Image (cartoon, rainbow, N blue to C red):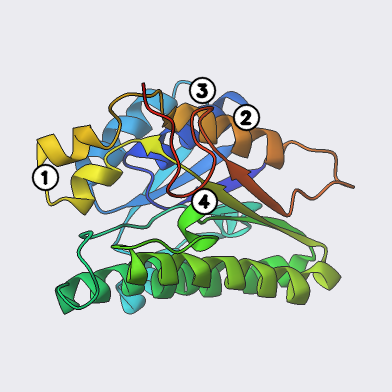
């Protein structure tokens, strides 16, 4: 059986990816903070494949290692790790921003990704097989005003992906980095602390990507021939051409 472990699986891109991979016969380890959403998703997908849930926050190092370390032999051999969990908090200028926002983004986007990877990679190395997909952002390729720390955290993901690839290719492990542009999920609601108007205004005047678009890309990447590794992909909606340039009608 092929096993995929997905972080941030309770919503957005993670949830959409779980649904797609279930259709391809992957057995799923769904990870996230929202236990109810994870269990609802498990109940839905269990008609298609085998599913287990691990409830943890990627920022909690001890919990990450404890929960992933608790997997029994049948589930321990993760074939595909999808590091999807992440967040953006606030869009103030650096001088005005709340330091707590920085902590949350760095702890989740950088340290959390590293914790989960550290818990999974040794077994991949041992069996000389595996695929890691890190969800970055166009913000990791272009820094913009009001996003200094968020962009820095996603640039870190880009560097981590590159470093993983350099270190793990000799172990027959693929590493793919995906950098989405504007995707309409709960991302903006989180960034703007639940402010519905601010979050909805982000997507006015054009058609953004939806979670399924990124999930389709992930499905393609993990089902490529063994000889193929999609190392780095940027995916935009048609109306977007850079991190800050979106044509709006």
Residue 215 relative to residue 37: left or right: right
Does the residue at mark 3 contact the one at mark 2 (Cβ under 8 Å)? Answer: no
The residue singled out by tag 4 in the image is 5
Report helix, strand or loop for mark 4.
strand
Which residue does the numbered mark 3 point to in the structure image? Answer: 48
Q: Which mark is residue 194?
A: 1
Earlier along the polypeptide chain: callout 1 or callout 4? 4
Q: Say which mark, if any, is on residue 236.
A: none
Q: Earlier in the sequence, mark 4 or mark 3?
A: 4
- Front of the two marks 1 and 4: 1
Q: Are marks 1 and 4 in contact (CB under 8 Å)?
A: no
Mark sitting earlier along the chain (2/1):
2
Residues 216 and 6: in front is: 216
- Marks 3 and 2, how far apart at CA: 7 Å
Residue wearing tag 2: 25
Q: Is residue 171 above or below residue 26?
A: below
Eye-nearest disc, 4 or 3: 4
* x then y, percent, for residue 118: 54, 75
Query: How far apart are the two marked residues, 2 and 1, measured between alpha carbons?
Result: 36 Å
Mark 3: secondary structure: loop
């Amino acid at each position: 059986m092929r096993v995929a472990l997905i972080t941030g699986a309770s919503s957005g891109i993670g949830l959409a990816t779980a649904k797609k991979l279930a259709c391809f016969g992957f057995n799923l380890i769904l990870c996230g903070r929202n236990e109810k959403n994870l269990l609802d998703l498990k109940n839905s997908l269990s008609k298609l494949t085998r599913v287990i849930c691990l409830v943890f926050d990627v920022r909690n190092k001890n919990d990450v290692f404890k929960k992933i370390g608790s997997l029994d032999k049948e589930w321990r051999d993760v074939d595909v790790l999808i590091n999807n969990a992440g967040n953006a908090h606030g869009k103030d200028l650096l001088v005005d921003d709340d330091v707590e926002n920085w902590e949350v983004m760095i702890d989740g986007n950088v340290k959390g990704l590293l914790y989960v990877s550290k818990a999974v990679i040794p077994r991949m190395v041992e069996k000389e097989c595996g695929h890691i997909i890190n969800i970055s952002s166009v913000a990791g390729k272009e820094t913009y005003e009001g996003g200094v720390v968020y962009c820095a955290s996603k640039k870190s993901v880009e560097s981590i992906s590159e470093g993983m690839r350099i270190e793990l290719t000799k172990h027959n492990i693929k590493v793919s980095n995906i950098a989405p542009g504007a995707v309409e999920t709960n991302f903006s609601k989180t960034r703007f602390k639940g402010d519905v108007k601010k979050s909805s205004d982000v997507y006015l005047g054009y058609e953004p990507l939806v979670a399924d678009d990124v999930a389709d890309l992930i499905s393609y990447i993990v089902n490529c021939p063994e000889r193929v590794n999609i190392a780095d992909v940027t995916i935009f909606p048609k109306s977007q051409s850079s991190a800050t340039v979106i044509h709006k009608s």
